[in-house]
Image (tube, rainbow, N blue to C red):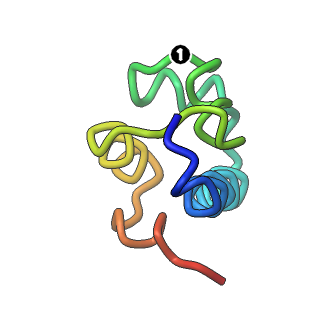
Amino acid sequence: MDTRHYKSYIQIGLNILHYRKERGITQEELAEMTSYSRNHIQKIETAAAAPSVAALLDIATALDIPVSKLFEFR
């Protein structure tokens, strides 16, 4: 993984976790909604894997949020 953007990947993962929990969705349910494995969702949330643009778009759609919400740095 590209470590230059690690802090950004952490924030994106935390945002996914936040919106997923806010909607009461498990990692398994999000995986089913996006056709990714639960393991891959877990790796994205913990910044163990860099998400593709397609994965971010799929996750945002599943969470019913604009993809820009995943890039908010609070």
Tell whether 50 sits left or right of 45: left
Image quadrant in which the C terminus is located: bottom right
Residue 57, horizontal then vertical, whole percent: 30, 48
Give residue 46's position: percent from left, percent from top.
71, 41
Q: Hey, what amino acid is under mark 1? A: Ser
- The residue sitting at 72% across, 53% down in the picture is 21
Taking the spot 29% from the left edge, 45% from the top edge, the residue there is 53
Q: Residues within 10 Å of mark 1 (few under 14, many from 20)?
A: some
Q: Nearer the viewer, residue 13 or 8?
A: 8
Classify 63 as above or below 54. Answer: below
Residue at disc 1, secondary structure: loop
**Taking 14 as reference, is 70 left or right?**
left
Which of 52/27 is in front? 52
Q: What is the number of callouts on the image?
A: 1
Residue at 49% across, 21% down: 32
Q: Position of residue 71 (x, y in %)?
A: 46, 69
